[in-house]
């Protein structure tokens, strides 16, 4: 039973500490839409999305009003489009028509983003996969709500270095295609290793082929709540600190569980998972970096940052799994630069570098996220950074990802503006030494020995 104390406590978290449900994401299978005729395929996709998700936004807003819980985003994820478009799409431009269809459907149902313009190429690429990947720069330049992701590796298959090299080129081309908007297209493009099938968070969300016809996944957030709770544990030992984080994560996840079950019931769509990631925003006080500083760091990036983040991530997951039997997605602590004011400040004063961010990705929820780099960074260097991050995920059996934004026309010390939840970011320096000889070898880096578990 929920008592009046817990009700009051939740109200305080919402009103004063930036607690929100970051997203209700409806996953929609498009497998039934496959067709060899491109026009028929697009029509089926539009009809499927707009029919299935027609009440998603209205339902989210009604739940928010009824329970007094902010629900920031309503989103859709679909089956990876490379799998759906293979029969009809003979060239990259054909896939772009599907991107436009998804964008139109997202506009018409009123969601913030639609994810799933994706390809899964951890072991090899079909011609359809390659065509979709090559279409990404044009697709993201010509749409507003479409998000794209490519999975280039996994612990079981190793790293597809041909795809890694190609994605270095695609990130650079996407930056060029959207250079008039500070290369914003790259903010909607994620390169994964070990991508999950049920991630509700953009830009990497897609509806995996192991999922049902439709499903509701909810992503909760609450860095501000955790930070406020930790103020009461100042000067206490790690046992007290960890217990405080776990209890707080439990409360946050219970809010998400309530919203997810209610959305599932009202929409008549099965409940999938709760993603209990601490996802920051540019709002003051809603920062993962500030949690780490509350734990005892003068500035995020200082020695001890990786250990503090590892502890935070683990305790968040331990608290969350006690609150819901269906925790999934990414779940942990996000460390995007542009979306976290504390991270932005740390980069600006030189406390946080891309190398330290890479070290932190060994223990955080995802990877190198929303990082603005100089616009003249080569495609080879971007591919090398993707390879490094994917290797961390492959060896450590975790999801890692890269969302780099080479801001065309800007250099170190300048600022890129993305707007809204995407925030802004100072352009951060990257290592200027070349890795071209490495990334151009081609082929596949084999899976690590511990992947062989059958």
Image (cartoon, helix red, strand yellow):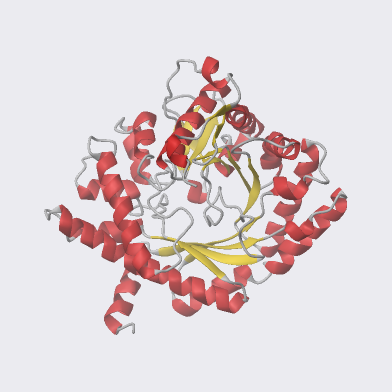
Residue drawn 67% across and 54% down? 79
Lateral position of residue 146 relative to residue 377, left or right = right
Does residue 142 appear in this view? yes
In the image: residue 185, left or right of residue 223: right
Q: Residue at x 45, y 17 (%)?
A: 432
Q: Is residue 76 left or right of residue 307?
A: right
Quarter of the figure with residue 108: bottom right
- The percent coordinates of residue 349 (x first, y second) are 30, 32
Closer-to-camera residue (149/293): 149
Q: Place residue 123 in its image quadrant.
A: top right
Vertical arrangement, residue 375 with respect to residue 220, above or below: above
Image x and y of residue 250, in percent: 33, 67
- Residue 249 drawn above or below residue 375: below
Q: Quadrant of residue 106?
A: bottom right
Residue 52 picture location, percent across and down: 70, 68
Instruction: Give the side of residue 239 with respect to residue 311, left or right.
Output: left
How many numbered marks appear? 0
Residue 221 in percent (x, y) is at: 41, 59
The residue sitting at 59% across, 74% down in the picture is 59
Location of residue 447 with respect to 210 vertically, above or below: above
Q: Is residue 377 visible?
A: no
Residue in view at x 19 percent, y 46 percent? 296
């Amino acid at each position: 039973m929920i008592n009046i104390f817990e009700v009051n406590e939740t109200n305080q978290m919402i009103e004063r500490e930036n607690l929100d449900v970051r997203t209700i994401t409806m996953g929609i299978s498009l497998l039934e839409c496959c067709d060899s005729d491109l026009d028929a395929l697009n029509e089926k996709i539009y009809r499927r999305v707009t029919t299935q998700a027609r009440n998603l936004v209205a339902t989210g807003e009604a739940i928010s009003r009824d329970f007094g819980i902010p629900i920031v985003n309503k989103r859709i994820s679909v089956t990876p489009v490379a799998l759906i478009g293979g029969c009809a799409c003979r060239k990259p431009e054909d896939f772009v028509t599907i991107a436009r269809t998804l964008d139109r459907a997202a506009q018409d149902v009123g969601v913030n983003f639609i994810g799933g313009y994706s390809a899964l190429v951890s072991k090899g690429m079909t011609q359809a996969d390659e065509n979709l990947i090559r279409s990404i720069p044009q697709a993201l330049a010509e749409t507003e709500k479409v998000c794209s992701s490519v999975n280039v590796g996994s612990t079981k298959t190793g790293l597809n270095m041909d795809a890694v090299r190609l994605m270095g080129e695609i990130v650079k081309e996407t930056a060029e295609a959207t250079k008039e908007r500070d290369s914003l297209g790259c903010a909607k493009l994620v390169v994964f290793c070990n991508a999950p099938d049920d991630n509700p968070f953009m830009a990497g969300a897609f509806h995996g082929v192991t999922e049902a016809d439709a499903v509701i996944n909810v992503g909760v957030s609450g860095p501000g709540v955790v930070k406020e709770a930790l103020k009461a544990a100042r000067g206490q030992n790690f046992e007290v600190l960890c217990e405080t984080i776990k209890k707080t994560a439990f409360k946050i996840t219970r809010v998400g569980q309530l919203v997810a079950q209610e959305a599932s019931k009202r929409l008549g769509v099965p409940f999938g998972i709760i993603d209990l990631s601490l996802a920051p925003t540019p709002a003051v006080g809603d920062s993962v970096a500030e949690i780490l500083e509350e734990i005892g760091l003068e500035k995020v990036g200082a020695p001890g940052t990786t250990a503090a983040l590892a502890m935070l991530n683990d305790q968040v997951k331990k608290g969350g799994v006690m609150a819901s039997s269906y925790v999934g997605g990414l779940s942990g602590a996000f460390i995007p630069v542009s979306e976290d004011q504390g991270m932005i400040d740390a980069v600006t004063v030189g406390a946080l570098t891309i190398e330290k961010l890479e070290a932190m990705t060994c223990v955080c929820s995802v990877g190198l996220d929303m990082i603005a780099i100089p616009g003249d960074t080569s495609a080879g260097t971007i591919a090398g950074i993707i390879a490094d991050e994917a290797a961390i995920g492959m060896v450590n059996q975790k999801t890692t990802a890269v969302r780099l934004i080479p801001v065309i026309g800007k250099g170190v010390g300048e600022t890129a503006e993305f707007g809204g939840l995407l925030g802004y970011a100072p352009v951060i320096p990257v290592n200027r030494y070349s890795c071209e000889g490495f990334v151009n070898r081609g082929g596949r880096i084999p899976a690590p020995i511990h992947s062989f578990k059958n």
